[in-house]
């Protein structure tokens, strides 16, 4: 078989070798889909048989007509489903007629599975009886697949002679003549049965010399990758279309009469029209002349709209109701030449109902298309593509009520459509409706792809009165349902650009849902959760559980020569979404307001009053620093930590108050007091026993070590902070409108954060500087190969932690960082950060003895174990994936998949200690 070449850059229409009759015109309720074929002998000594990808192909012929040989010659073994093979599978003998019923049940099952997957399926059976073909055609209709037939009309004598020479099969003499009579009786009616194309090969010579050519499905333009400019419903608004094309950078080409007949795109772009070029507007012929010229020149693609079908019927002379603007179109076309009307008729009748573009990542149709119909070819698919699904009801204006298919859409391809006019185009579950009612006085809208940029041109006037007012928005609003449990529940996987596929187990997904269900910010705002930061590996220096030497050595082994060491703050890590104004937040996320602050579990940390005060200060600092203006965004997303101790009675979440060192000191005060009261008498008694010569030296040494640990523990408690003001320490700007800012050089992050903190401390004009609410995190750069540099960093860490600081976070200078395979290392993604905590802080966290002891290797945590590091890498990749999807304008459910996966991974059975 000759298979389609993937190199053409422009769409082609396959040539059908069998004559066809005109296409019956579809109606909104029961549209027809394709021309009805007339079976006819395929001409020539070497007949060429085009077969469509993904279709059901029935080989029709008597026994011994050569169907199996033909199938082996022209199709892959996996593409052929043979009735003989199914008999062998069921009854161990392909000639066992007693298992025929079960064999054909298996055959129908296999055919259905292949067609459901969109694969070419060839049925090798006699198929001479109408009832047998009817059952297979029903399977094709169920899966919206084309059905084609190849008839092998071989003389009875030839078939009988072949049968006599077959040692494995003996047929009664009457079987082949009977099958041949059934075949001849079927030929005139094959087209009416539902086959989209019928090839008839007469005689053994034609069967032997035939060539099968595999054609792409008409909708399959996946080889065209763009970039594209997709244009919504024009409805005869030629002037607005010219303006829009000019704004998109297209150069109009005019004929001698000054009429636009083409538009040359910029930088190899291609325009794509979603249908409904005609009706209602002032210049339907002008729009058609321009779009037809663009399509003919290869500068545009166009799919059919329902209004194009009505124009085609009217031009054919059919009786049609001249309503919904058709009367205006026919009057305008009536003033054109007969040649132009003939060109229009040919153009509109040749339009496809939908296209798959950009490797299948983009689907263009007129009225929308669920994922199960993408690339399919049937009356049902064509009906949905042109008219959309309906509930069968009508509204108060007498118009059909549309099914909210976009609310349920969860497909990966972006579906771009029109048909239902909306005031503003917006993305809904990876779909976007570009019909913004230009002819009704709204606007003509285009989508630049893959940029996802919407370009809008206001209508020059209201050209036509709508039957009903434009809808206030897409069904379900900007994002539809805030969250569908099915998107994040159960076992599932999330594809990440950085770390491949991340699997989520059902029990972990349930834990994530339970966490968010108990206490969470508005789910529409929950667009990011930060990854965990694993601790450094076990320290080799005596007396230390963790030490910076291990972090420097680890990054040096990964080929990272320079790292950033930043102060590790004792408070919880938080995410802050701050808006320039309430409207900016509403435009992108739905709810209006100043923003939100949430923890690593999505929990709101402040009461409304304190949160509003913090966000107001942060908004003012971002405004004064120029970040809103510089980034061209009405909102900013920040990664930060809280530091300080909440004052008694502060309106904060109990978890925030419990995370402070002061709270830890209160919880452990009883243990410190008890140990202080009990250990001195124990030591005194042991010392007296030793003085009397008793062998208690080992026990005495252990109790002295415990006493020393407790003294250090109590000292750490005394240095643990006092109640005061909680400060926000931002350390990374994560995202802004249309941009993932989390990646890139650390110097850029530091510079932006420094500007933000400095702006918070700047006094407003004519006023005094308020008490700061933003905290600048101390940091320094370290050369991992320079002993002097690393020694200075260790000294800084010791000084910081001795004064009560938690420790430091060490990370590479660029995020993300990958290392190539080399000596002693496998290569791959470098750990984005590790934390090195001081002994004082570890005492507060884990008790008096833990700070000076290396982790127990038998525990699952093992300090910075492989499991903890692997978990951190997966969470990091998921976090960046969520930001990528947010920046790309993808629907909320897609962002939530990555966000909830981070929370689900936090339920992994690893050491829960911080």
Image (cartoon, rainbow, N blue to C red):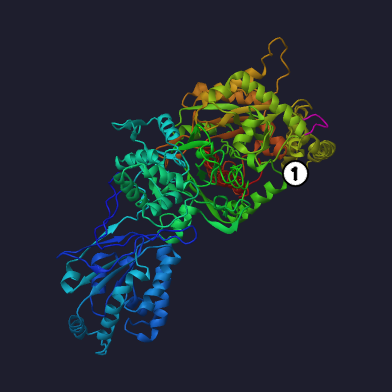
Q: Give the camera-side residue of 19 and 76.
A: 19
The residue most toward the top is 766
What number of labels is visible? 1
Q: Would residue 767 be found to the left or right of residue 778 on screen?
A: right
Considering the image in quadrants, where does the C terminus appear? top right
Does any portion of residue 291 appear in the rendered image? yes
Q: Give the camera-side residue of 479 and 707.
A: 479
Considering the image in quadrants, where does the N terminus appear? bottom left
Q: Give the camera-side residue of 867 and 340.
A: 340
Mostly what secondary structure, the magenta segment? loop
Q: Would residue 229 be found to the left or right of residue 867 on screen?
A: left
Does any portion of residue 822 appear in the rendered image? no
What is the crowding at mark 1: few (fewer than 14 residues within 10 Å), some, or many (at least 20)?
few
**Image location (x, y in percent) of residue 359:** 38, 47
What residue span does the magenta drawing correspond to?
A: 646-651
Up/down of 841 relative to 75, above or below: above
**Image location (x, y in percent) of residue 684:** 83, 37
Label 1 belongs to which residue? Answer: 695
Residue 648 among those drawn in magenta: yes
Up/down of 203 relative to 510, above or below: below
Up/down of 589 relative to 142, above or below: above
Where, by quadrant of the figure, is residue 34 drawn? bottom left
- The residue lying at 30 percent from left, 33 percent from top is 255
**Image location (x, y in percent) of residue 389:** 53, 56
Q: Would residue 6 be found to the left or right of residue 619 on screen?
A: left
Where disc 1 sits, the SS reads loop
- The residue lying at 35 percent from left, 54 percent from top is 218
Residue 666 among those drawn in magenta: no
Q: Give the camera-side residue of 97 and 276.
A: 276
**Image location (x, y in percent) of residue 804:** 70, 27
């Amino acid at each position: 078989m000759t298979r389609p070449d993937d190199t053409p850059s422009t769409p082609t229409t396959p040539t059908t070798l069998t004559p066809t009759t005109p296409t019956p015109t579809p109606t909104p309720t029961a549209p027809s889909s394709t021309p009805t074929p007339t079976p006819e002998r395929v001409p020539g000594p070497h007949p060429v048989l085009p077969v469509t990808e993904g279709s059901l192909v029935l080989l029709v012929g008597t026994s011994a007509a050569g169907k199996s040989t033909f199938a082996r010659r022209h199709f892959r073994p996996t593409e052929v489903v043979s009735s003989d093979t199914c008999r062998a599978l069921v009854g161990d003998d392909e000639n066992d007629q007693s298992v025929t019923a079960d064999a054909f049940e298996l055959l129908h099952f296999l055919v259905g599975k292949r067609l459901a997957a969109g694969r070419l399926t060839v049925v090798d059976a006699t198929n001479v009886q109408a009832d047998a073909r009817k059952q297979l055609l029903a399977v094709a209709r169920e899966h919206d697949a084309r059905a084609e037939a190849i008839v092998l009309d071989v003389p009875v004598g030839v078939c009988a002679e072949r049968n006599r020479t077959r040692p494995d099969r003996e047929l009664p003499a009457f079987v082949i003549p009977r099958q041949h009579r059934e075949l001849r009786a079927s030929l005139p009616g094959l087209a009416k049965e539902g086959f989209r194309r019928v090839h008839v090969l007469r005689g053994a010579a034609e069967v032997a010399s035939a060539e099968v050519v595999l054609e792409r499905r008409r909708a399959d333009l996946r080889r065209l990758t763009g970039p594209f400019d997709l244009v919504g419903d024009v409805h005869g608004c030629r002037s607005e279309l010219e303006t829009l094309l000019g704004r998109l950078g297209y150069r109009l080409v005019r004929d001698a009469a000054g009429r636009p007949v083409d538009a040359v795109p910029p930088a190899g772009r291609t325009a794509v029209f979603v249908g409904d070029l005609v009706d209602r507007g002032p210049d339907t012929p002008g729009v058609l002349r321009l779009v037809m010229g663009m399509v003919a020149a290869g500068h545009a693609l166009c799919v059919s709209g329902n209004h194009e079908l009505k124009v085609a019927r009217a031009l054919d002379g059919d009786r049609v109701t001249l309503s919904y603007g058709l009367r205006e179109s026919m009057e305008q076309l009536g003033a054109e030449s007969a040649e132009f009307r003939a060109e229009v008729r040919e153009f509109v009748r040749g339009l496809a109902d939908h296209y798959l573009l950009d490797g299948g990542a983009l689907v263009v149709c007129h009225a929308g298309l669920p994922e199960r119909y993408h690339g399919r070819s049937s009356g049902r698919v064509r009906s949905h593509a042109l008219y959309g699904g309906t509930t069968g009801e009508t509204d108060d204006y007498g118009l059909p009520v549309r099914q909210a298919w976009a609310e349920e859409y969860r497909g990966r391809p972006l579906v771009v459509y029109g048909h239902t006019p909306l005031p503003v185009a917006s993305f809904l579950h990876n779909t976007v409706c570009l019909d913004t009612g230009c002819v009704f006085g709204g606007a003509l809208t285009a989508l630049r792809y893959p940029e996802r940029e919407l370009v809008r041109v206001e209508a020059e006037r209201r050209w036509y009165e709508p039957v009903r007012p434009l809808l206030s928005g897409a069904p379900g609003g900007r994002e539809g349902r805030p969250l569908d449990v099915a998107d994040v529940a159960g076992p599932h996987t999330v594809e990440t650009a950085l770390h491949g596929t991340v699997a989520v187990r059902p029990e972990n997904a349930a834990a994530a849902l339970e966490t968010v269900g108990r206490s969470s910010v508005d789910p529409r705002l929950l667009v990011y959760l930060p990854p965990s930061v694993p601790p450094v590996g076990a320290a080799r220096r005596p007396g230390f559980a963790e030490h910076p030497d291990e972090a420097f050595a680890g990054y040096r082994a990964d080929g990272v020569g320079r790292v950033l060491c930043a102060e590790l703050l004792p408070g919880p890590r938080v995410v802050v979404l701050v808006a320039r104004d309430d409207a900016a937040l509403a435009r992108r996320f739905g709810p209006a307001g100043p923003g939100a602050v949430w923890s690593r579990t999505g929990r709101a940390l402040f009461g409304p009053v304190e949160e509003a005060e913090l966000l107001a200060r942060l908004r003012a600092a971002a405004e004064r620093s120029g970040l809103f203006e510089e980034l061209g965004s009405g909102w900013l997303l920040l990664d930060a930590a809280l530091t300080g101790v909440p004052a008694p009675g502060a309106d904060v979440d109990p978890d925030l108050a419990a995370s402070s060192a002061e709270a830890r000191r209160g919880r452990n005060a009883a243990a410190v007091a008890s140990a202080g009261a009990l250990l001195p008498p124990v030591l005194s008694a042991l010392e007296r026993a030793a003085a009397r010569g008793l062998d208690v030296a080992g026990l005495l040494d252990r109790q002295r070590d415990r006493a020393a640990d407790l003294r250090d523990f109590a000292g750490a408690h005394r240095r643990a902070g006092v109640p005061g003001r909680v400060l926000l320490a931002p350390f990374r700007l994560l995202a802004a409108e249309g941009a993932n800012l989390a990646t890139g050089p650390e110097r850029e992050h530091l510079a932006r954060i420094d500007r933000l903190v400095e702006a918070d401390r700047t006094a407003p004009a004519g006023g005094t500087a308020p008490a700061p609410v933003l905290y600048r995190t101390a940091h320094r750069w370290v050369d991992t190969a320079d002993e002097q540099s690393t020694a200075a960093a260790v000294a800084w860490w010791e000084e910081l932690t001795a004064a009560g600081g938690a420790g430091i976070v060490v990370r590479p200078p660029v995020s993300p960082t990958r290392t190539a395979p080399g000596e002693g290392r496998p290569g791959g993604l470098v750990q984005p950060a590790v934390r090195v905590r001081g002994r004082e802080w570890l005492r507060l966290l884990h008790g008096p003895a833990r700070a000076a002891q290396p982790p127990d290797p038998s525990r699952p945590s093992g300090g910075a174990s492989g499991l903890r590091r692997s978990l951190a890498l997966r969470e990091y990749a998921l976090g960046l994936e969520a930001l990528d999807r947010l920046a790309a304008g993808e629907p909320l459910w897609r962002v939530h998949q990555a966000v909830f996966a981070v929370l689900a991974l936090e339920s992994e059975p690893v050491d829960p200690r911080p």
